[in-house]
Amino acid sequence: MDTRSVIIEATAELLARSPGGEVSTRAISEAAGVQQPVLYRLFGDKNGLLRATVDHVWGQYLGSKRAAEESEDPLRDLRAGWDSHTMFALAHPNAYKLMFSSALGSDPGPAEEAMHILRSVLERLARQGRLRVAPDAAARMVMSANTGVALALITRPTLYPDIKVSDMVRDAIHRAILLDPAADTAPQDAWRTAATTLLSSMDAFTPEPFTPAESALLRQWLAQIPGAGTQG
């Protein structure tokens, strides 16, 4: 393991053990077995080191999500993704808080990858005709709610002492974005769901049945249906 990796691993360990999320460069250098100037040479400043550490911790989490096999039911994967996100936050509260710290100025890369993974699950649901809103809008709804409840659990444990609140928020958000065939019988629901399904499936047509101009026009028409467009 090179010196940079040793320092990041030491920082991650200290960060995980810190009651309030504070770690000093002196403690880091001692734990890594290097002189403090080495930290600044490799990372620029303390914030640079913390950003690299947060990316490392989040990278491990995202690696497990990349390696996870898709189940036959994307809804099962959607629920599992929410729950794993919440459990990651509870297991790594300091790194999780730093990820969303404006003072640290974290690289948006890990957050963007997490959103991409979530959107891919929602697109599978859309192709099955089970999504009430466009995948992009649904992804923003799910991620903002999941992040909010995770931050609430780790920053205000006395106000949110029961992790079951995560399950309740998850189920409420899923009801808002998913089609319930038994309840959604209004014509506008059928139109919106059909448009969302077709929009999400157009790239899968092989061979492409329309010219590029026709495809663009069809996408434009479908996006005019309220709730179906990617602008959400």
Image (cartoon, helix red, strand yellow):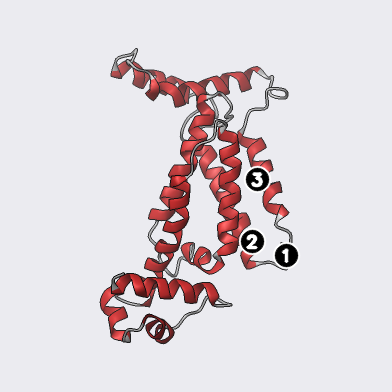
Which quadrant is the N terminus positioned in? Answer: bottom left
Name the residue beneath numbered marker 1.
159
Inspect the image, locate mark 1, and give the three-letter code of the amino acid beneath it.
Leu
Under circle 3, the secondary element is helix
In this rendering, would 47 be left or right of 176?
left
Mark 3 neighbour density, 10 Å: few (under 14) some (14–19) many (20 or more): many
User: x and y percent of residue 150 in the render?
Assistant: 60, 57
User: x and y percent of residue 21 in the render?
Assistant: 53, 75
Q: Could you tell which of marks 2 and 3 lies nearer the N-terminus?
A: 2
Rendered position, 89 above or below 219: below
User: x and y percent of residue 14 in the render?
Assistant: 48, 77
Question: Is the Cβ of the residue at disc 1 closer than 8 Å to that at disc 2?
Answer: yes
Question: Is the Cβ of the residue at disc 2 closer than 8 Å to that at disc 3?
Answer: no
Callout count? 3
Q: Is residue 232 visible?
A: no
Rendered position, 149 above or below 123: below
Inspect the image, locate mark 2, and give the three-letter code of the amino acid beneath it.
Ala
Q: Could you tell which of marks 1 and 2 lies nearer the N-terminus?
A: 2
Measuring 37% from the left and 67% from the top, which residue is drawn there?
A: 52
Under circle 1, the secondary element is loop
In this rendering, would 60 be left or right of 191?
left
Name the residue beneath numbered marker 2.
152
**Rounded to the nearest whole Å, what is the CA distance between mark 1 and mark 3?**
18 Å
Front residue (pair 12, 24): 12
Q: Which mark is residue 60?
A: none
**Rounded to the nearest whole Å, what is the CA distance between mark 1 and mark 2?**
8 Å
User: x and y percent of residue 71 in the render?
Assistant: 54, 35
Measuring 43% from the left and 52% from the top, which residue is drawn there?
A: 63
Name the residue beneath numbered marker 3.
170
Q: Could you tell which of marks 1 and 3 lies nearer the N-terminus?
A: 1
Inspect the image, locate mark 3, and give the three-letter code of the amino acid beneath it.
Arg
Q: Is residue 42 visible?
A: yes
